[in-house]
Image: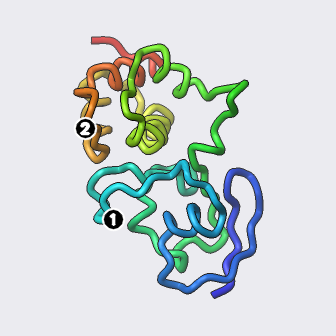
Amino acid sequence: MKLSLEVNKTLHELDVPPNTLLVDLLRVNLALTGTHVGCDTSQCGACTVLLNNRAVKSCSVLAAQIEDCKITTIEGIGTADDLHPMQVAFRECHALQCGFCTPGMIMQAIDLVENTPNLDKRGIREGLEGNICRCTGYHNIVRAVASVAGAVD
């Protein structure tokens, strides 16, 4: 199928099988490997990206569903010289260890902060439930998201 979509503010015209997963389209067709494949069952959140500014697990979205959509991956939110505020917070709060979950966690956190009014630490924990980190115990991740959201308690 012919597919037109915007990824990280760049328009792409692709020809892919309709059963192509968004995660594969990003990693294979566009060489955007910051989106990780963790479980292939939509359980871990490592593949989370923004689809029309809302977090989705890209391993559960088909190419046939994303015609004319806007996708933002971890590569599209900042640069090494100009990090996104959430990336800065993760670094400053030591919110990562191995880093495998970090891109998906950051993308979920951006959606959470941008779309949840009156966010507190409990809301952050609940909002990150679908993203699994096997290293950190989540405390520093919650601190990082809270620092960007201005959340207390």
Does any portion of residue 115 appear in the rendered image?
no
Q: Nearer the viewer, residue 129 or 23?
A: 23
Is residue 56 placed above or below 24 in the rendered structure?
Answer: above
Numbered label tally: 2
Residue carrying label 2: 134
| Residue drawn at (33%, 20%) of the image | 140
Is residue 121 placed above or below 66 in the rendered structure?
Answer: above
Q: Are marks 1 and 2 in contact (CB under 8 Å)?
A: no
Question: Hey, which quadrant is residue 43 in on the image?
Answer: bottom left
Question: Is residue 121 rendered to the left or right of residue 117?
Answer: left
Near mark 1 (Cα within 10 A), the count class, few <14, some 14-19 or many ≥20, is: some
Residue carrying label 1: 40
Residue 60: image location, x then y, percent: 39, 67
| Residue drawn at (33%, 24%) of the image | 142
Question: Is residue 41 rendered to the left or right of residue 56?
Answer: left
Residue 93: image location, x then y, percent: 42, 15
Give whichever of discs 1 and 2 has the lower sequence position. 1
